[in-house]
Amino acid sequence: MFYEPEKDNHGLKRAPFKSCVVPRPIGWISTMTAEGVPNLAPYSQFTNLTYDPPYVMLSINQSPKKGTRKDTAINIEATGEFVYNMCTYDLREKMNITAAEFDYGVDEFAAAGLEKAPSVLVKPFRVKESPIQFECAYV
């Protein structure tokens, strides 16, 4: 198949760009508003970038419904901190709840029935049920 991302010439239901790079781990990203309200959202454009130093990369698009920046991007830039939480198969339904577009300042941990674990190095909470979390600083 030949595909030009800037043209709609693929004949598929959805543009195939995201499906061409697999597997794509889900970056379940927890942040905190400048006022201290927790935020949690999944991102499929997430990966490790380097291991020495350990960097992760996250791509956050605009909100398709609002046409504005997503809460996660606003929070990361305002506070300089976030946490990557590994999402397992058993957590998939709760992760799907956090994928909904909530109003700014809504606590997605509470909406999904997830427990918050305090972080050691950053202010955003970790997902207690997640087996692996990376506490991160925005660079």
Image (cartoon, grey):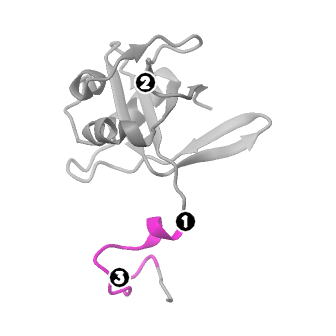
In front: mark 1 or mark 2? 2
Which secondary structure lies at badge 2? loop
- Residue 22 drawn at (x, y percent): 54, 63
Q: Is residue 107 magenta?
A: no
Residue carrying label 3: 8
Mark number displayed over residue 129: 2
Query: Of helix, strand and loop, which one carries label 1?
Result: loop
Left or right relative to 28: residue 14: left
Q: How many marks?
A: 3
Disc with the residue nearer the chain's start (2 vs 3) = 3
Q: Kindly report the secondary structure that dominates the magenta region of the rendered protein.
A: loop
Residue at 35%, 13% (x, y): give it. 36
Real-space Cα separation, disc 2 to disc 3, in angstroms: 41 Å
- Quadrant of the drawing holding the C terminus: top right
Residues drawn in magenta: 5-21
Tell me which residue sits at (52%, 24%) in the image: 80
Callout 1: 10 Å neighbours few (<14), some, many (20+)?
Answer: few
Across and down, in percent, residue 122 comes to: 54, 15
SS for dot 3: loop
Q: Nearer the viewer, mark 2 or mark 3?
A: 2
15 to 61, vertically: above or below: below
Q: Give the residue drawn at x 19%, y 32%.
A: 103
- Where's residue 55, x and y in %? 68, 37
Instruction: Return the residue nearer the eye: 127 or 58.
Output: 127
**Label for residue 21?**
1
